[in-house]
Image (tube, rainbow, N blue to C red):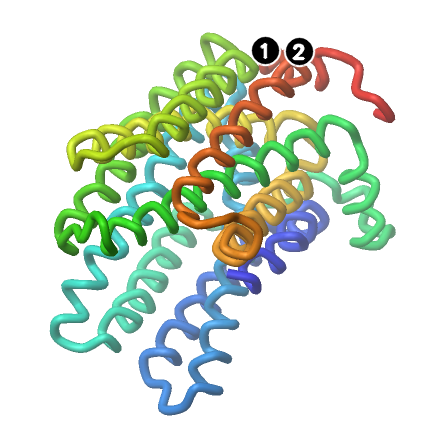
Amino acid sequence: MLPFAATQFFSGAISDLYDRRRLVVLGLLLFSAGSWAFGFATSFAFALAARLVQGAGFGLVAPVLVAILGDIVPLERRAQSLGYFGSALTAGIALGPVLAAIFGEAHWRLTFEALGILALLSLLAFVSFFRSPVQGTAKEERGKSLIWLLLTTAFRGPVLLLCGLGFATFLGFVGILAFTADAFSQAPFDYSPALVGAILAASGISGMICAPLAGVATRRWGPRRTFVVGALGSAAAALLLSEAESELIFLLLFAAIGGTSAFLWTPLLTLVTTLIPGRRGTVSSLFNGVRFVGFALAPVLWPAVLPAPVWVWTDRIAALLFFGGFLLAGWLPATLASPPGARPLKGS
């Protein structure tokens, strides 16, 4: 996860200066090579190197795809398109463990070999659709350094807000998934692996269904109202989750978390493409990099700072993080056409 997060900080910015198409092609090739290498690894060092390549490869792809969607989709349809994009990502996250279990029945190496094949198929589909270069939107700034581009973008108030909200919501969401699901397999729950899988799948399926709806909501209600719905819904579901006891309630609340979180991330991703149109790849790099730092940090941070039972406190802290997002939502643009920062941000 760390190579994935680290690479994302630069890939979108590079794509603003040069050709987005080449970065996606390179990223998919690296991801495929890393997957195949891991499948054939015979030592820990080789396997670790392969995973580093795999993570770095996908880190080149993720922010650039968001920027490309911002380039090619008109503003009036962009939120809905990013909703479908979010639904596809959620489908991959939800189906990945299931497919891994199926391939793992034969041999664990098949899982990574299958990933390598899927990456190559995705590459073929991408180059067949994008036959010519997809030039970045900051070509006139090529004479300036990459660090300059990142820093002069990162310290703008609306971008800082966007990154902070992405980090906090991912930190809370991943904490819920990781520690609550882990608690299900232990006393006093002792749920079967199948039941734990079903509860986790409820979150993924709900996210897949709700992400396109969140895109429609972002277009009709605006990013601020849509994010408020997601923040309050996620906070309520997380708080109720910390007090739940029955299998059915857990399943319903995980479905609620998956659905309401789509209303958090779809408006934020849409704003990534609109805040600074000439640097949307750079904004995408910063936003995706920071939020996936939250993804990588959650499994390490929460056990170190929270008392037992960790899963109960993780759910409560996640509820506070989501509610904090609600309190900050007033500074998000009310509509996609409005200027960034509905209220003045200190220091912006």
Vertical order, 54 against 50 (above or below): above
Local packing at callout 2 (Cα closer than 10 Å; few below 14, some 14-19, many 20+) is few
Which quarter of the figure has residue 43? bottom left
Q: CA distance from mark 2 to mark 1?
A: 5 Å
**Residue 49 — which label?**
none
Q: Residues within 10 Å of mark 1 (few under 14, many from 20)?
A: some
In this picture, residue 162 sits left or right of residue 326: right
Check disc 2 and report its element: helix, strand or loop. Answer: loop
The answer to whether mark 2 and mark 1 are in CB contact below 8 A is yes
* Vertical order, 194 against 277 (above or below): below
- Kind of residue indicated by mark 2: Ser
In x, y percent, where is residue 164? 65, 35
Q: Residue furthest bottom?
A: 42
**Whole-percent x and y of residue 344?**
79, 14
- Give the total of numbered labels: 2
Q: Amino acid at mark 1?
A: Thr
Residue that carries the numbered disc 1 in the rendered image:
335
Percent position of residue 219, x then y: 47, 14
> Is residue 24 shown to the viewer in this render?
no
| Residue 212 visible | yes
**Residue 299 % position (x, y):** 48, 55
Q: Secondary structure at mark 1?
A: loop
Q: Which residue is mark 2?
A: 338
Q: Is residue 31 shown left or right of residue 332?
A: left
**Residue at (60%, 53%) from the top-left corner?**
8
